Amino acid sequence: MAYKRYHLPEGFILGAAASAWQTEGWSGKKDYQDSFMDLWYKSNPELWHNGYGPTIATNFYNRYHEDVKLMKEIGINAYRTSIDWSRFIKDYETAEVDEDAAKYYSDLIDDLIKNGVEPMICLEHYELPAALFQKYGGWGSKHVIELYVKYAEQVFKLYGDRVKYFFTFNEPIVIQTRSFLDSIRYPFFQDTKMAMQWSYNKILASAKAIEAYKRGNYNKDGKIGIILNIEVTYPRSSAQHDIAAAKIYDLFFNRIFLDPCVKGVLPDELLKILNYHHCCFEFTEEELDTIKNNTVQILGLNLYAPARVKARDSAWNPSTPFHPSYYYEKFELPGRKMNLSRGWEIYPRIMYDMAMRIKNEYGNIEWLVTENGMGVENEGNFKNEDGVIQDDYRIEFISEHLRWLLKAIEEGSNCKGYMLWAFTDNVSPQNAFKNRYGLVEIDLDYNRNRRIKKSGYWYKEVLKNRYFDY
Ligand code: BG6
């Protein structure tokens, strides 16, 4: 097979991502410092694969020095993680900081910088304090937005001098979709209006945190944005009804955040549909102004799989509460390459299509791929005689996705980097440690020891050479 050489553009950031709750473990957390994810795990541990949850996770809290050493060895340019709000703040009302937690994050940031790894910090990767969910209903409450902004300001004050990339939320739509629309995750109830209110409140919270960041002038090179999980949507056919269905899917799952966060405006079409179905969120004109005046300075996109959408073939059951699928059905394209462990189609062209859309429709804002990756089950079966996981499928996956991204950059996309999910294997919602995503294996049989996989060595070469052959 003839290979082609793909060069990374000058200054392109090649890194890896993770989050606090999926790696840290509960070490150092006080009894009351549960996050929403901790609460969920405590409520239904049986739903998590083999019972693994955030309890120990990868024990990053105690072992991050080891991981940073591995980051240095592989040579990654940046590491994205989150601060666990529930751990970092001692008193959620006054935003008094927990000194132990503040020191831990400060040391981690220093360690990354000392080892040539740019820290990228997200303020909420589902680590809403459980107490705020229980007392105020979480993101449904405008008071929680105020508490979040106070928390964000503490983070900016303490780390804003050293951290140049902040993100207000990771995938802010996910909890609503899974918990309140589809009702397949804790707390398992269906409430479309509540889902919409949570989304809107997070949009507002993000804008307010951006406003606070700008006000503080923490770092002349600093930038703040949001991380959205985009489902690049393709209609089944070019027939009007399929195109209309795909547009609605895109509206409810992509534009709902993209438009206000990047352009500063909520899509009119969305408001019309929500009003028609009596589930529009509450908002004020003043809030809309805040959203308008505080759009993101950088955008993070998590890109995993396409959404294939068609007009409904089956009738909507009128006795069910409104759900956006009133307007569409999803389907699988036969014959496509699938990531079977996750049930996701592998379609690397999403990188190009989304990159060009950002260029053409969103003012070519500076952006990063903040997640892309391949979760695979039973990787232990692919070890060579030295015990190194031979994950050629991951190398192929990354190469194909990067290739499409680089093509878009050549054509003018303002994408500045690619962060693989994930640096190490980690715990993820319900999959727990089932689907492994890391460049580095976490060995559950051996005390969560770390070992670089073949893909990690490959990534190291790419980082050293600044090109790869594929
Ligand atoms: C992203 C999330 O959607 O996907 C991560 O930001 C998550 O938190 C990752 O772990 C992979 O998803 P999963 O469910 O396959 O582990």
Image: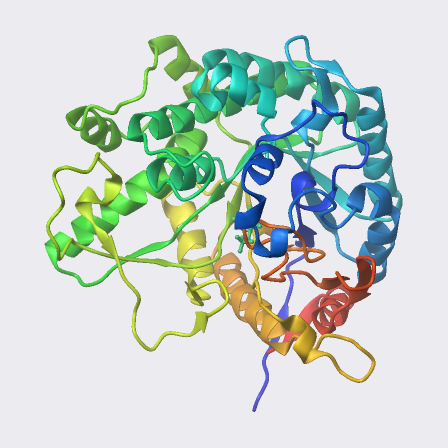
Q: Position of residue 309 (x, y in %)?
A: 26, 56
Of residue 295 and residue 108, the one placed in the foreground of this image is 108
- Looking at the rendering, which quadrant does residue 277 occupy? top left
Q: Residue at x 81, y 61 (%)?
A: 450
Residue at 48%, 57% (x, y): give it.
Answer: 304
Q: Is residue 75 left or right of residue 296?
A: right
Residue at horizontal 80 percent and vertical 84 percent from the top: 385
When the figure is inspected, residue 178 is found, relative to residue 201, above or below; the finding is below
Q: Is residue 247 left or right of residue 359?
A: left
Q: How is the image coloured?
A: rainbow
Residue shown at 67% from the left, 78% from the top: 381
Q: Quadrant of residue 119?
A: top right
Depth order, front residue of 63/369 = 63
272 sits to left or right of 134: left
Percent position (x, y) of residue 360?
Answer: 37, 47
The correct choice, above or below, for 139 with respect to 305 in the image is above
Q: The N terminus lies in which quarter of the figure?
A: bottom right
Quarter of the image containing the C terminus? bottom right
Asked if residue 402 shows in the view, the reply is yes
Residue 462 at what x, y percent from top left? 72, 68
Relative to 15, is 204 above or below? Answer: above
Q: Quadrant of residue 125?
A: top right
Q: How many marks?
A: 0
Q: Nearer the viewer, residue 289 or 59?
A: 59
Residue nearest the observer in this picture, 213 or 7: 213
Most distant residue in the front direction: 46
Visible residue check, residue 419: no
Q: Position of residue 35 (x, y in %)?
A: 62, 30
